[in-house]
Image (spheres, grey):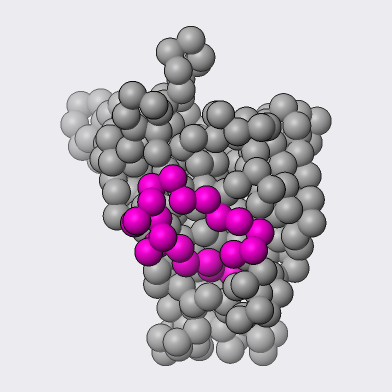
Amino acid sequence: MSVLSDLVSALSAGDIEVVDLTSPLSSETAVLQLPPEFGQTARFELEEISRYDARGPAWYWNNFRTGEHTGTHFDAPNHWVTGRDGADVASVPARRLVAPAAVLDFAAEAAQDADFLLEVDHIKEWQSNHGPLPEGGWLFYRTGWDRRQRQEEMLNADVTGPHTPGMSVECARWVGEESPVIGVGVETVGTDAGAAHSFDPAFPCHAFFMGNDKYGLTQLQNLGRLPAKGAVVIAGPLPIVTGSGAPARVLALVER
């Protein structure tokens, strides 16, 4: 057990930092907004049960209501039609919830162009500088979008629709079909670009990731505090039976 003992010692000494990648979950948390003809995800709501009063004199607790895909959340394969026969969020193997991460930083590009798209060549250039993407790990795509918290800022929509960064169709296909990663993490409300409704296929990240038994993590924060490689990520979605996803607490272990 010396490896685990060493880990605990390093955490205690501050040699390993725990970075919280999770956005706080409240009624103000931004949510994906679909055209009105489609069903909509619910915002997060708390319903007080008791608060040290006649309803419960010694305890405070709440019921809550929210969508599976609200706030920082995990997309399971059955979330999309291409993965409809795949695993629900409760069936994701626990061993896949702890994995290394590669962090690709394109915050400067996204600041100049809200519709910036990651391409396969961007990933291959990163690999030429940092080595291959981690086998069985995550590809985290930093765009600086975590600085935006309000609904209007996150969606960044105008009369033509949302404008948020994402991946090109070819990049999404390559990550889903050819790359060694188990999934992609982003800072935006979904893994796809704001304009992905007009791509062919529409929403290619969802189509290619879910269809290839891969996952998504969205509305991450603090990716700028992670190294390009070397962080270990712990992603803990609620194990909702038959669920297509769940809010998640996502942490990164970073050696300092």
Residue at 56% in and 83% down = 7
Residue at 50% in and 88% down = 9
Pick the front one: 156 or 227: 156
Residue at 40% in and 69% down = 224
Q: Where is residue 253 in the image (x, y as percent from the top left)?
A: 51, 74
Q: Position of residue 15 (x, y in %)?
A: 45, 88
Examine the image and state in which quarter residue 71 appears.
Answer: top left
Examine the image and state in which quarter residue 53 appears.
Answer: top left
Is residue 142 on the magenta stretch? no
In magenta, the rendered stretch is: 93-122
The N terminus sits in image quarter? bottom right
Left or right of residue 172, residue 115 in this image: left
Pick the front one: 155 or 168: 168
Residue at 66% in and 52% down = 171
The C terminus sits in image quarter? bottom left
Q: Is residue 134 above or below residue 169?
A: below
**Labels in figure, total:** 0
Q: In this view, does 111 lie above or below 65?
A: below
Left or right of residue 89, residue 113 in this image: left
